[in-house]
Image: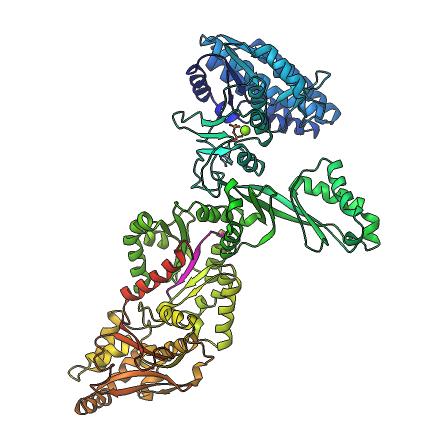
Amino acid sequence: MIVLKFGGTSLESVDSIKEVKEVITSKSGGRIVVVSAIGKTTNELQHMAELARAGDTQYISVYEQLHDQHAAIISSLLDISFHEKIEAIFKQLRRVCDGVFLLKELTKRSLDFILSAGELLSSNIIASYLKKEGEQVNLLDSRAFIKTDDSFGGAVVDFHTSNGLLKQALETSSEVTVMGGFISSAPNGESTTLGRGGSDYTASIVAAALDAEILEIWTDVDGLMTADPRMVKHAQVIDEITYEEAIELSHFGAKVLYSPSLKPCFEKDIPIRIKNTFNKQTEGTLVSSGTDDDQLVKGITSLQNVSLISLSGTGLLSIPKFTKDFFATLAQHNLGVEFITQSNAEHTITIGLASEDAECAYHVLTKNFESHIADGLIDPIGIERDLSILALVGKNMKNQVGVSGNMFHVLGRNGVSIKAISQGSSERNISAIVKKADLSKSLNVLHEAFFQYEVKRVNLFIVGVGNVGKAFLEQLRTQSFILREEHRISIKLTGVANSQKMTLDEEGISLDKWKDKLDAGDDFDPKRFQHKIIELNLRNSIFIDITAAKAIADLYPDFLQKSISVVTPNKIAATESFISYQNLKQTTRRYSSQFLIETNVCAGLPVLSTLSDVVRSGDHVHQIEAVLSGTLNFLFNEYDGSRNFVDVIKQAKEEGYTEPDPRMDLSCEDVKRKLLILIRESGYSFEMNEIALEAFMPSSCQNTTSMEEFYKQVEKQEDYFKELYQKSKENGTRLKVVAIFKDGKATVKLSEIRTEHPFYHLEGKDNIVLFFTDRYKEQPLVIKGAGAGAAVTASGIFADVLRLSQPES
Ligand code: ADP
Ligand code: ASP
Ligand code: MG
């Protein structure tokens, strides 16, 4: 004997009912078929009943819609336009609804009567259809076999009586028996129901009563999955799971199985297989008592609408009765508690309930403790709304330390604050309460962390698509396949903006078409762009600023506070006052975000990451000597008096070696900023105005108001530049702008470098940095290489993005 249960999702249409028939007829021997109501019929019946109670005549159109839907299925499947039994069920349903409408009263008892129509209809239709197709079919009214008490809406099964009745009727049956799930009857014969989703329960009760070989639950997904597939796109089918794990998963929201339904089969050790009606050949999920897999976390599950209720006050410490009363009140009103935590000092009890239950709990508790609240022994009852519970489930978690630590680390890094935590006494479940708005992000990020064979998704938001920005997007485009296939990282461009336009797409913007998408985007506004990014609330979000604009740098603190990391070559934020630099750093620590500015100094060269390793490993930097401007190095290497200095500047700008405004380079302002960052990242408190600058530009060139004027002035000063060059040539030296930090003092100046100095052979637009530290005393730590250019800067940004994208980061 086997039991097959088909849910509403498998009975939604004529075509799906045909699939159901395929499943049933592909098997032989005694088969008990338990069916739910067709599609969403139960929801519609409930809706209809509530309209009638509210005195809204719309209930009639809902009724007619349901009638027509069923009539259409019957006419297609059975080739008849009138089905006596079905019409009789509808007639009775209509009479009861008219009664509800007239009285404006809907009791749990009448609601159960109304809801039970769904399964009565579906079981009649399926049985008639199977008969028409030539099967020997026995149709049972489940209400005559599943007996319960009279707690309508979620009746308690009388197993003794039900098992006896089921055995008597079905034990020796060798044909197909069809019965409706979910419905049952009280001792006096009135219709009761087993709670929403209860057809699974009916099937399990029948399977256990008859010692079935197996219970197959046929639905519209490939099995029980590692997470709700509607919330987590990458959820995977679980091949095998124990009863206990499945109970935990379904208790906290895995809708595919109704939680109580597992118990009867569990007690009899009857295996349950969950399979997909629309994808029959897949194996599905086997729920049984013994699996010896070593998977740590089996699944992640959640309840979306939850509120926290808290009871606190000094009275709780001294008067134990309060705690007892608290729980007794909840039990009295039939309010299911999903989650309990108690603070160490027993000063506060916090419970989580489904939101509707919580509203009721709040009122009854406030009323119950009214006098103690008035005399100050108990604080007013607390309620916090718009929350969700999520839970990690797995039997092997108890053998492994650090699962909860990792869970909270992963959530924290994504800016999810946890309101409460509870570890089930079975240690098969760790649950946490988070804000409802953070649920989707939390589930996805945990899924990535605990099912690591899957690809980690990273979301990039970029402002600035000039030379460097374009080069970065191109590198990303060419690398994305390898990143995905070999490193399991999927980096998506989720938002992009320039000074004119902005566009965002949660699904990711094509790296081939980003430009068209951007051109068609909205007008750019930094604050609005930021607001949209924060509102999307996506996991692993990174903001990349490839501009030199202060308005963009001003956005960083808000991003960092939302745990969105920032990557940027823009030096403005890191070179403002030391206090604001420190504040940024503190924000990153507090909100588990990162501020990565490798490309602030020497483009893509790993200067700051090396410096950070040096400092973190306990070394001390005493002295820094560096050539930090690729632009200036290029100018003085190229310029030999044969063409005008201004033309060399123009060439550098065209080739992308300068700042957007080359005056930043020529005034040495840019070098000062880089030196300041090196000093600060070495651990010193330092300000921009403490750096002494020996400017080499004549003042007429420095104080210009436009680029044209600047170029004009430089041209006028050609003799001055020629003289600088000639003098150095005669001395056998080369000109370099050198940045030095020594004995707590910092200077930037144009120097003549002798042949024996390590800087002498610095070619093209190269940079060099020497760090003298405790450990690198005689021979400094040297980093040298290309220090300017779109491609190298872009690859430095890429390196920072990858640093943030590693699974362990
Ligand atoms: P049925 O009508 O077959 O009883 P349900 O709608 O009650 O179907 O349950 C199936 C649905 O449960 C799936 O379509 C899926 O969206 C949802 N679901 C939620 N969590 C899970 C999970 N962890 N695994 C599988 N399905 C899940
Ligand atoms: N039809 C009922 C419901 O929708 C029972 C079930 O589908 O399991 O809740
Ligand atoms: Mg269901």
- Asked if residue 191 is positioned above or below residue 303 in the image, the reply reads above
User: Which residue corresponds to the image point at 59% horizontal and 22% vertical from the top-left?
Assistant: 205
In this view, which residue lies farthest toward the left? 642
Where in the figure is residue 324, as x and y percent of width and height?
77, 43
Where in the figure is residue 787, as x and y percent of width and height?
28, 72
Quadrant where the C terminus is found in the figure? bottom left
- Asked if residue 649 is positioned above or below residue 407 in the image, the reply reads below
Where in the figure is residue 318, as x and y percent of width and height?
80, 53
Q: Which residues are magenta?
A: 537-546
Where in the figure is residue 651, as x and y percent of width and height?
22, 74
Q: Is residue 314 left or right of residue 571?
A: right
Residue 606 image-quadrant placement: bottom left
Q: How is the image coloured?
A: rainbow
- Asked if residue 689 is positioned above or below residue 281 in the image, the reply reads below
Q: Is residue 446 left or right of residue 89?
A: left
Residue 357 image-quadrant placement: top right
Residue 395 vs residue 81, the one in the foreground = 395
Residue 699 vs residue 680, the one in the foreground = 680
Residue 193 vs residue 162, the one in the foreground = 162
Residue 395 appears in the picture as rendered: yes
Residue 141 appears in the picture as rendered: no
**Is residue 671 rendered magenta in the image?**
no
User: Which residue corresponds to the image point at 42% horizontal and 85% vertical from the top-left?
Assistant: 744
Q: How many marks?
A: 0
Q: Is residue 481 left or right of residue 502?
A: left
